[in-house]
Image (cartoon, rainbow, N blue to C red):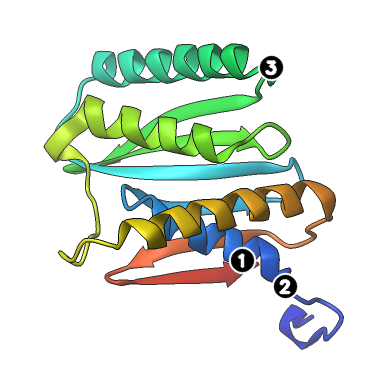
Amino acid sequence: MFDFLNENKRPNLDAGRLLAAILVVYPPIQAVSYDPKDGMLELSFALKGNFTKDMFDGFLEYVAASVEAYHSLEGLGDANIELNAEGVYDTCFINIRRDMETMTCGELSLLTEIAINYFGGQLIEDIDGSDNDEEYIIAQEDYLEQMLGNMRQFRIENRLVGVRERERVVIYNN
């Protein structure tokens, strides 16, 4: 009845660290989740302003073509990617779902740069104003690559959700 009382249900620390690292290294990503049922990682970008369906369709087509080209250049094979956009009032969300088997740190960087370049100042970024040290970011990217590798090797049983909350990152275990 009360699932939180089940002591056998332990969160996977590497999976939680992966979600936290994604949010730390890529400030434009507002939320990230992992669903073990389909092995998909979902990245959510938040936008302020009003957008047309054509703008979203253009962005989604551009992302799909870019990921396909990236995978072709890197020799990674086909990627399972799902894209959608949803809006509420003056805030819209772009959601990119990717399978963990072919996701790389380079692709995360590509997706983030595409969002930054395409939407510019309309992209909501939760940055505290201080620039992170370049060595720290490089170390986080290396750590992120290691965590992606760990996620491919170990079974994660619980759904995880990571969100930005001002200057903090919070990970929930469902």
**Camera-nearest residue between 34 and 66:** 66
Q: Position of residue 34 (x, y in %)?
A: 63, 51
Residue at 57% across, 13% down: 73
Report, in whole angstroms, how far the alpha carbon at label 2 lies from the one at label 1.
8 Å
**Quarter of the figure with residue 129:** bottom left
Whether 89 is drawn above or below 172: the answer is above
Q: Position of residue 53 (x, y in %)?
A: 28, 18
Q: Earlier in the sequence, mark 2 or mark 3?
A: 2
The amino acid marked with disc number 1 is Gly
Residue at 38% x, 50% y is 26
Query: Left or right: 94 with respect to 39?
Result: left
Q: Which residue is mark 2?
A: 11
Mark 2 Cα-neighbour bin, 10 Å: few <14, some 14–19, many ≥20? some
Q: Which residue is mark 3?
A: 78
Q: How far is disc 2 from disc 3 in space, using C-alphas?
A: 30 Å
Estimate the spatial distance between the alpha carbons at disc 3 and disc 1, rounded to whole Å.
26 Å
Residue 16 disc label: 1
Residue 4 lies, in percent from the top left, at: 72, 83
Q: Is residue 65 above or below residue 101?
A: above
Looking at numbered disc 3 in the image, what kind of residue is underneath it?
Asp
* Foreground: disc 2 or disc 3: 3
Residue at the spot x=79%, y=80% of the render?
1
Element marked by disc 2: loop
Which SS class for mark 3?
loop
Which tag, 3 or 1, sits closer to the chain's start? 1
**Disc assigned to residue 142:** none
106 w.r.t. 161: above or below:
above
Q: Residue at x 77, y 46 (%)?
A: 152
